[in-house]
Image (tube, rainbow, N blue to C red):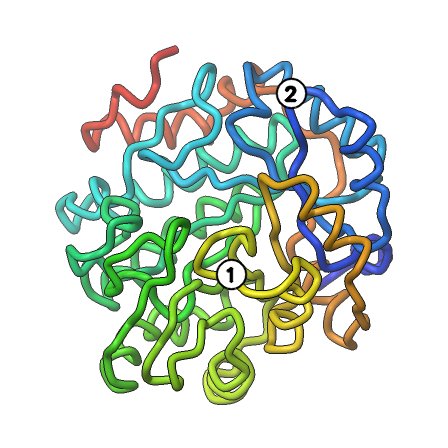
Amino acid sequence: MISQEKLRIAGTLGPVVVDVSGPTLDEGDIARLRHPLTGMAILFSRNYSNPAQLAALCGAIHGVRPGIPIAVDHEGGRVQRFREGFAEMPAMSRIAELPSETRCAAFWAAGYVLAAELRSCGVDLTFAPVLDLDYGRSEIIGSRALGRDPESVTANARAFMRGLAEAGMAACGKHFPGHGWASADSHSELPVDERSFEALARDMKPYRELALELPSIMTAHIAYEAFEGEVATYAPALLQDCLRGEIGYPGLVFSDDLSMKGAAGGSPAERAERALASGCDMVLLCNDRPASESLLAGLSWHRGEAFNERLARLLPEPGDALSLDELRLTALYRAARDTLERAGFAGAFPF
């Protein structure tokens, strides 16, 4: 059940995810956060020095734009933006290699610890889990994957998402329809997936199985020959006909970062409008302040009927979160820590 307060907050937010410049806000950050088309803030390693500073930054962001969700890419392994003072989560592929009798509990514990620590500092959402299958080909996925086959990825993601939810955090599955086959890195070039629709359907199985459990997903900047070579972010046949229609996905769809080379073509506003028209609900454009400002200045957007409800599902429950020190004294955190340590990841907790 979505509260009326969450729907009210979502109604004040737009479709653009913006980043901020450093560990504190400057005037440019404040102006972009206040822009009516802004709907979420995303943080990076440059925004972090320690948990107290992060909590202060999140408080400042919420002070500028009350209720705006704050997100981060914080998956564990090599994709973990905040390190000093946080648990060092293992790469998800390492958890996936555990024996079946301990794997599910370890994924739950990893999701809980990761999300609970973020929430204690004011971060509302992490763009995780990765649902891409590990074919041993992708430069950018690799150890981030939760498994090599759809069944394993689905089961492992479901356990991880239970941990996130128990800590009060929504999930975002990525990168639809699958980033595990194409070998190139979409940050620096446009990857191509030349497989047939039948082959690609295997990659989509986790999304199909988790469609009613995933509050949000993120698209892949990959050209799929099964969809006439269109980049997924810009492909109505993939996002509207397949994802919304055939799979029946009801949640919010993020584009991946539109500053990446895999999304190149047109002005920032043109890229965003193309992604939104194709089936994305929200768009990211990061690490390029002039482009972000250009996007906000030039974007034409109509609030769809489902936007507020989809975004409201990502908002945390109101109430004061425990501090990081208080969190680590709770029975649930200690249980999750014990589970990971028994699974062989004692090094994740250097404190």
- Residue at image position (28%, 72%) is 193
Label 1 with label 2: CB-CB less than 8 Å: no
- Residue at image position (37%, 44%) is 108
Q: Amino acid at mark 2?
A: Pro
Residue 73: x and y, percent? 49, 41
Above/below status of 124 relative to 46: below
Identify the secondary structure beneath mark 1.
loop
Q: Nearer the viewer, residue 237 or 109?
A: 237
**Structural crowding at the residue carrying mark 1, measured as other residues with C-alpha within 10 Å and reported as few (<14), some (14–19) or many (≥20):** some
Question: For residue 264, which numbered disc appears in the image?
Answer: 1
Task: Say whether residue 126 is visible.
Answer: yes
Rendered-image quadrant of the N terminus: bottom right
Above/below status of 125 relative to 307: above
Marks 1 and 2 sit apart, C-alpha to C-alpha, by: 29 Å
The quarter holding residue 177 reads: bottom left
Q: Amino acid at mark 1?
A: Ala
Determine which residue is flagged by label 2.
23
Residue 252: x and y, percent? 61, 65
Q: Nearer the viewer, residue 270 or 160?
A: 270
